[in-house]
Amino acid sequence: MGGVARIMIYHKWSVVGFMLCLRYGLISMRSLRGLEDIYARHLESPGTKAYSRSEAFSLFKDFTHVDIRTPLAHADLLESSVGQRHRGLFLSVARLIWPRWFLRCFFPDNGLFMMITAYK
């Protein structure tokens, strides 16, 4: 027995999730779409899933200790390029006005990447 697993899954309650909800939900006049549907259709590839912290802990319930971190990264702060299907006027404007300092101060643990270290 023993061992360590280090994996990354997408974090449901991330800044990127908020951006996707704005872009593909509210602004598109499809505000009734669920977050799961928006992630599955617009994040990476069809069917992409994102998990809450409690869902991630549940996935690793058989491990003796689980450490989960969700730090902000380049995607959350709009500091890097994005896939071609997300480009456009909305993103160009958002990059100019994106409140990076505010996110770093008040939402430092709402990043897209959920980094998990689980010990057996």
Image: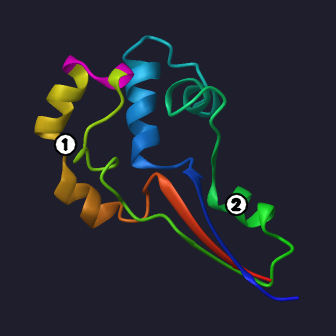
- Which residues are the magenta region? 85-89
Q: Estimate the spatial distance between the alpha carbons at disc 2 and disc 1, rounded to whole Å.
A: 29 Å
Q: Is residue 61 above or below residue 21?
A: below
Q: Residue at x 50, y 26 (%)?
A: 42
Residue 68: x and y in percent read: 58, 71
Q: Is residue 52 left or right of residue 60?
A: left
Q: Main secondary structure of the magenta part?
A: helix
State which quarter of the image contains the N terminus. bottom right
Q: Residue at x 56, y 50 (%)?
A: 10
State which quarter of the image contains the C terminus. bottom right
The quarter of the picture where residue 110 lies is bottom left
Q: Which mark is residue 98?
A: 1
- First-in-chain label (2 vs 1): 2
Q: Is residue 25 left or right of residue 118?
A: left
Q: Is residue 88 magenta?
A: yes
Q: Is residue 46 magenta?
A: no
